[in-house]
Image: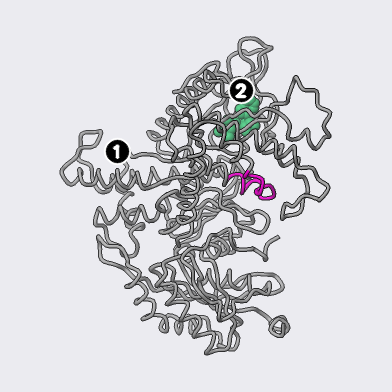
């Protein structure tokens, strides 16, 4: 354990994190104060692969994007952080879950840095990265976590050194539902389909288009809603009228979809909060940037005498800093990922990770 | 979860009429509030389940959900009661106003019973070698039977957790068990049918079991390994149960896949 003695003498611990489980390539550098545990973001650089309207991002193209930008983004992150390579303790990378090809191309980049600079590697669970970053930024101690992104919809609560999944989407993730709906409406994917739905929805509100509402206990389902919403979009293009006799607009559709799916998310979160007896809720993941979702969650939390914690797009949307942060937490407990084990896995449950850094 | 500050919320109108006993707020759940009050006769305690409107929800959606759920809950309770499934009887209902008045069930939630039994056990959940787990295993078996009984009648609960089952103490069986065993004694009474639906498909039944399995694992990680006894006693409880258990494996696989994609 020579490294442990070496690091404990230093003032601060520093990690570089690499993320690329979906269409964002992110590299960030974080510092932890070993005495107070305080985390400082030194840099957080991201480059997103944006596909044309009406299309989604394919693994092959996304992986190519990540490979093409890895060196550039890494150099920027290093320059922005103002640290020298020698100060870095470890290289953290997303082990999973996510899309195979993009994950492996970023892992190859991380391995290269580790070998080049003679640093240790730490493989990180992407979901745990989101949760730990959310806790660090907001200061939420022990919240129920709603993790909502393009690939995941989970309601999570911490118990006995694991992040346990209380509820989840039984079919497609909520972000996937929004993204595919944006494709049906041919809304731009720049900067993100969900963001553009949110902006359009602000012009809606005149009518609420009836969509199925599918909650089962603490689980929910979105594919039926997507099918129905796509159906209404097709009718809308043929001039379908709303309940008030006026033509339905894309803004009405965005509004109605958001109101319905977010109500479902708030409901399953509230059920988990009641179940574990907590009144704090933390929203993480890309969909968590949505201000309407934050507002609805806030209204629910206030009624329960608690509050909602959320972060902005820098930390909500996939990024390298969250991987650096969660990786460094594990590193500080002695966790390492030997080179031969530095693989990726598309499937990696949040509750598989032993959370040694929490009591 | 019992409410400490009673009456901090505005009461539903039905509870503002002169009643023989003042209502007390028992639980502030996710969906709504549960009051203990009396119905017509002061000697007949009952539970009033009230779903106030949710401020975060669009008013049209809110009204639609509140009304549909209270009505569905009452309908399903009626059906179960008629079919001999142990649930609270329905006394009165006003769906648009968001309340249903049901039989009061004495006892405590199963969740509490299990936690009382487990006490301060080490994390891996292995009991001391000397410990006789039979009472807890028996409870698991009664849970399996209760769920099987429910499914037999064509009802899907939709929110099976150990909070949504009551342990009603055995009146007729004087118990000479120790305090610890008493914690897990009693008949299972299923409650909270707010998300219930009617279905006899293997798929819906299997999802119902899956919801319970996961709720159980996350609520009682230390007793997770005993969940198999729930399924064991579910299996012979009605004709189609074995095929539901097979379907459950599919549902598990799907659940695992979905929750692991980044
Ligand atoms: N009929 C009843 N008799 C006694 N207690 C009840 C009854 N129904 C519910 N409770 C208690 O109130 C709590 C909340 O009721 P529940 O019907 O589960 O509502 P919620 O939808 O809020 O979860 C239960 O966990 C239980 O402790
Ligand atoms: Mg309940």
Question: Between marks 2 and 1, how big is the CA–CA gap?
Answer: 37 Å
Q: Looking at the picture, how far across and down is residue B85, in whole percent?
A: 56, 24
Tell me, for residue A129, which label it has, or none: none
How packed mark 1 is, by other alpha carbons closer than 10 Å (few <14, some 14-19, many 20 or more), is some
Question: Looking at the picture, does residue A75 appear above or below residue A236?
Answer: below
Quarter of the view holding residue A83: bottom right
Question: On the rendered image, what quadrant is the N terminus of chain A found in?
Answer: bottom right
Residue at (68%, 34%) from the top-left corner?
B2
Residue at (55%, 76%) from the top-left corner?
A92
**Nearer the observer, A310 or A331:** A331
Secondary element type, mark 2: strand
Q: Main secondary structure of the magenta part?
A: helix
**Nearer the observer, A14 or A158:** A158
Tell me the subunit letter for badge 1: A
Residue at (68%, 16%) from the top-left corner?
B21
Decide if ligand 1 comes within 8 Å of the CB at mark 2: yes
Quarter of the view holding residue B35: top right
| Residue identified by numbered label 1 | A207
Q: Looking at the picture, how far across and down is residue B23, in whole percent?
A: 64, 21
User: Which quadrant contains ligand 1?
Assistant: top right
Is B97 a magenta residue? no
In the drawing, does residue A240 fall left or right of residue B252?
A: left
Q: Looking at the picture, how far across and down is residue B183, in whole percent?
A: 76, 35
| Residue identified by numbered label 2 | B47
**Nearer the observer, A12 or B74:** B74
Question: Looking at the picture, does residue A305 appear above or below residue A287?
Answer: above
Tell me the subunit letter for badge 2: B
**Nearer the observer, B206 or A44:** B206
Decide if ligand 1 comes within 8 Å of the CB at mark 1: no
Q: Would residue B36 be seen by someone viewing this image from the given angle?
A: yes
In the drawing, does residue B249 fall left or right of residue A58?
A: right
- Magenta segment: B215-228
């Amino acid at each position: 354990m020579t490294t442990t003695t070496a690091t404990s003498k230093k003032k601060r611990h520093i990690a570089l994190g690499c993320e690329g489980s979906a269409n964002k390539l992110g590299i960030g550098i974080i510092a932890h104060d070993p005495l107070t545990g305080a985390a400082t973001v030194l840099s957080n650089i991201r480059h997103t692969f944006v596909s044309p309207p009406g299309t989604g991002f394919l693994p092959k193209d996304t992986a190519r994007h990540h490979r093409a930008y890895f060196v550039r983004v890494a150099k920027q992150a290093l320059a922005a952080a103002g640290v020298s390579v020698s100060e870095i303790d470890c290289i953290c990378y997303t082990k999973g879950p996510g899309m195979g090809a993009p994950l492996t191309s970023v892992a190859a980049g991380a391995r290269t840095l580790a070998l080049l600079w003679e640093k240790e590697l730490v493989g990180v669970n992407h979901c745990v990265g989101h949760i730990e970053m959310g806790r660090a930024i907001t200061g939420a101690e022990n919240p129920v976590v709603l993790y909502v992104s393009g690939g995941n919809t989970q309601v999570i609560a911490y118990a006995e050194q694991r992040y346990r999944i209380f509820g989840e989407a039984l079919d497609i993730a909520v972000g996937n539902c929004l993204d595919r709906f944006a494709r049906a409406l041919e809304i731009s994917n720049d900067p993100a389909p969900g963001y553009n739905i949110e902006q359009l929805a602000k012009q809606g509100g005149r009518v609420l288009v009836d969509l199925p509402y599918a909650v089962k206990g603490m689980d929910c389902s979105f594919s039926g809603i997507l099918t129905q919403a796509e159906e209404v979009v097709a009718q809308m293009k043929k001039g379908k009228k709303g309940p008030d006799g006026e033509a339905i607009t894309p803004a009405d559709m965005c509004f109605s979809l958001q109101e319905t799916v977010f109500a479902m998310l708030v409901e399953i979160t509230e059920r988990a909060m009641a179940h574990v007896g907590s009144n704090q809720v933390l929203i993480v993941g890309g969909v968590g940037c949505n201000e309407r979702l934050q507002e609805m969650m806030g209204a629910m939390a206030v009624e329960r005498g608690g509050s909602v914690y959320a972060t902005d797009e820098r930390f909500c949307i996939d990024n390298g800093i969250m991987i650096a942060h969660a990786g460094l937490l594990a590193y500080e407990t002695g966790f390492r990922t030997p080179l031969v084990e530095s693989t990726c896995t598309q499937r990696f449950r949040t509750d598989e990770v032993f959370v040694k850094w929490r009591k | 979860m019992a409410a400490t500050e009673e009456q901090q919320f505005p009461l539903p109108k039905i509870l503002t009429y002169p009643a023989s006993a003042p209502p007390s707020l028992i639980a502030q759940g996710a969906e709504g509030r549960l009051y203990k009050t009396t119905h017509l006769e002061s000697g007949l305690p009952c539970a009033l389940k009230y779903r106030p409107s949710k401020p975060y929800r669009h008013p049209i959606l809110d009204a639609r959900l509140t009304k549909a759920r209270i009505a569905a809950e009452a309908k399903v309770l009626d059906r179960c009661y008629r079919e001999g499934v142990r649930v609270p009887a329905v006394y009165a209902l006003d769906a648009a106003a968001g309340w249903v008045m049901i039989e009061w069930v004495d006892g405590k939630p199963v969740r509490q019973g299990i936690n009382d039994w487990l006490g301060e056990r080490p994390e891996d959940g292995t009991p001391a070698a000397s410990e006789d787990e039979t009472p807890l295993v028996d409870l698991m078996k009664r849970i399996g039977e209760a769920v099987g009984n429910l499914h037999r009648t064509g009802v899907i609960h939709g929110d099976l957790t150990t909070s949504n089952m009551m342990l009603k103490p055995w009146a007729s069986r004087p118990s000479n068990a120790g305090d610890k065993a008493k914690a897990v004694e009693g008949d299972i009474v299923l409650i909270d049918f707010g998300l219930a639906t009617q279905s006899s498909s293997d798929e819906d039944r299997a999802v119902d079991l899956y919801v319970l399995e996961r709720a159980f694992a996350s609520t009682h990680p230390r007793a997770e390994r005993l969940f198999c006894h729930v399924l064991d006693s579910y299996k012979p409880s009605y004709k189609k149960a074995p095929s539901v258990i097979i379907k459950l494996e599919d549902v598990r696989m799907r659940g695992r896949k979905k929750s692991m994609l980044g």
